[in-house]
Image (spheres, grey):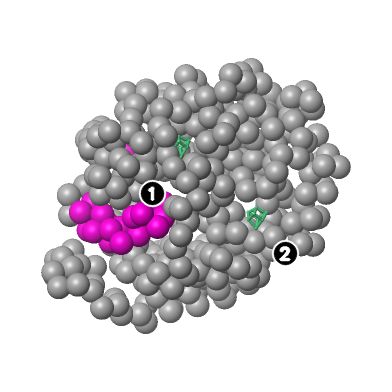
């Protein structure tokens, strides 16, 4: 039974490269002042795509599974719920990644209600609340007084409103920086003890940030931190897959933890110097990034290849354009590298080597690891949560 489940999951996972994910900067509007923001010089411009332009984008894209929303603060986009429903209807999107700073919960809930009413059970949403440290650190990084408390309140309100809806997952995402890396374990423990989130994910700061000091971390400190963060992933994996029958649960958990451990490793190896990924980056081939104003790119970290507006918002033409072909050729030829887990994840989906060998091996490694030395008291809290 477990064997049949394994082969079914593998058949779903090992597939030839095909367009799979749209990264859409759904608005440039933002109500935060994050010193980690790689999009800061484009925020609050007046040239956001209209709903009709986004409709045209959707109509000219093939079917694809994953919609990664970005911005700006996505909840400040008036028609956010309608836009998500549009891609679910026209393109068969199955999973939506919706980051939020949690400062406008009423807008977030309005969008989620619209999606629930306008899409079927097969469409799942990961709502990712940003929390970049404990209260003082988070507020100082994000430039908004009382931000931490407001976001935590929004997370709890989302839990009481959607806790019974399995297809809406309420996660926390923390960006690892020089200012918070020493308190992220404490944040993780605090959230595991007091909030009922579906997951807690950690991403290394990336891109050109307004405060370059945010990136003053060492590879060694990142490795040390990652090893202490893995128990949180085990904790949330238990919850995430609790509803599955035993065999499927074991396999899903192994792939989930192996994937996350692999992301950590690739990020560590590429933190301050390039090291070849275990797979080719498929940015621009299986993914398309569309900026708030229709600029299109292979990935969030490379330059704009062209403007969809100049292609009549026709995404098929943009994907087949000489500019985009030049970009994807350059990515392969130049051995492009970065720590961007969304693209590590998207690229790994099309690599038999990653699916059949790297993920299971990473799972085995994390399984064999013990929690590194921890300060007195911390270990007890890990044990209380059955994380150690
Ligand atoms: S990181 Fe997000 S929330 Fe922060 S300023 Fe940038 S767009 Fe706004
Ligand atoms: S390796 Fe990173 S920076 Fe290079 S194309 Fe892929 S996602 Fe973009």
Asked whether the residues under the numbered discs 2 and 1 touch, taking CB atoms below 8 Å apart as contact, a structural biologist would say: no
Q: Which of the 4 quarters of the picture holds residue 227?
A: bottom left
**In the rendered image of this protein, does residue 283 appear above or below residue 383?**
above
Q: Residue at x 63, y 71 (%)?
A: 275
In-front residue for pair 71/178: 178
Could you tell whether 68 is left or right of 139 in the image?
right
Residue 170 rendering spot, x and y as whole percentages: 33, 43
Q: Is mark 2 within 8 Å of ligand 2?
A: no
Residue 171 rendering spot, x and y as whole percentages: 35, 46
**In the rendered image of this protein, does residue 382 appear above or below residue 35?**
below
Residue 275 appears in view = yes
Q: Which residues are magenta?
A: 165-191
Q: Residue at x 47, y 46 (%)?
A: 211
**In the rendered image of this protein, does residue 124 appear above or below residue 76?**
below
Secondary structure under badge 1?
Answer: strand
Task: Identify the residue position indicated by label 1 in the image.
Answer: 173
Task: Identify the residue position indicated by label 2 in the image.
Answer: 335
Residue 89 rendering spot, x and y as whole percentages: 57, 29
């Amino acid at each position: 039974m477990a064997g049949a489940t394994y082969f079914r999951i593998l058949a779903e996972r090992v597939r030839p490269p095909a367009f799979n994910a749209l990264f859409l900067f759904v608005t440039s509007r933002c109500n935060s002042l994050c010193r980690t923001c790689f999009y800061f010089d484009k925020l609050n411009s007046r040239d956001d795509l209209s709903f009709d332009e986004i409709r045209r984008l959707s109509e000219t894209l093939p079917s694809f599974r994953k919609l990664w929303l970005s911005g700006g603060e996505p909840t400040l986009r008036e028609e956010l719920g309608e836009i998500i429903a549009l891609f679910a209807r026209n393109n068969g999107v199955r999973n939506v990644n919706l980051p939020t700073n949690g400062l406008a919960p009423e807008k977030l809930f309005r969008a989620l209600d619209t999606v629930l009413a306008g899409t079927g059970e097969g469409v799942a949403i990961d709502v990712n609340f940003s929390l970049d440290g404990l209260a003082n650190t988070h507020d100082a990084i994000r430039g908004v007084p009382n931000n931490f408390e407001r976001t935590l309140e929004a997370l709890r309100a989302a839990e009481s409103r959607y806790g019974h809806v399995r297809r809406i997952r309420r996660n926390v995402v923390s960006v690892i920086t020089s200012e918070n890396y020493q308190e992220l374990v404490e944040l993780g423990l605090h959230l595991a003890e007091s909030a009922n989130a579906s997951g807690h994910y950690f991403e290394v700061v990336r891109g050109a940030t307004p405060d370059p000091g945010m990136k003053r971390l060492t590879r060694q400190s990142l490795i040390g931190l990652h090893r202490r963060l893995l128990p949180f992933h085990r904790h949330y994996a238990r919850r995430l897959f609790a509803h599955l029958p035993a065999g499927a649960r074991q396999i899903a958990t192994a792939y989930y933890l192996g994937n996350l451990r692999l992301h950590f490793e690739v990020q560590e190896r590429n933190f301050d110097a390039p090291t070849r990924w275990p797979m080719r980056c498929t940015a621009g081939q299986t993914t398309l990034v569309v900026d708030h104003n229709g600029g299109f790119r292979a990935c969030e970290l490379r330059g704009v290849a062209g403007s969809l507006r100049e292609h009549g918002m026709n995404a098929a033409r943009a994907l087949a354009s000489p500019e985009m072909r030049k970009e994807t050729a350059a990515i392969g030829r130049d051995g492009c590298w970065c720590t961007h887990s969304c693209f590590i994840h998207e690229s790994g989906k099309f690599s038999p080597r990653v699916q059949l060998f790297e993920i299971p091996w990473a799972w085995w490694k994390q399984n064999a690891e013990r929690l590194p030395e921890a300060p007195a008291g911390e270990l007890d809290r890990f044990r209380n949560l059955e994380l150690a």
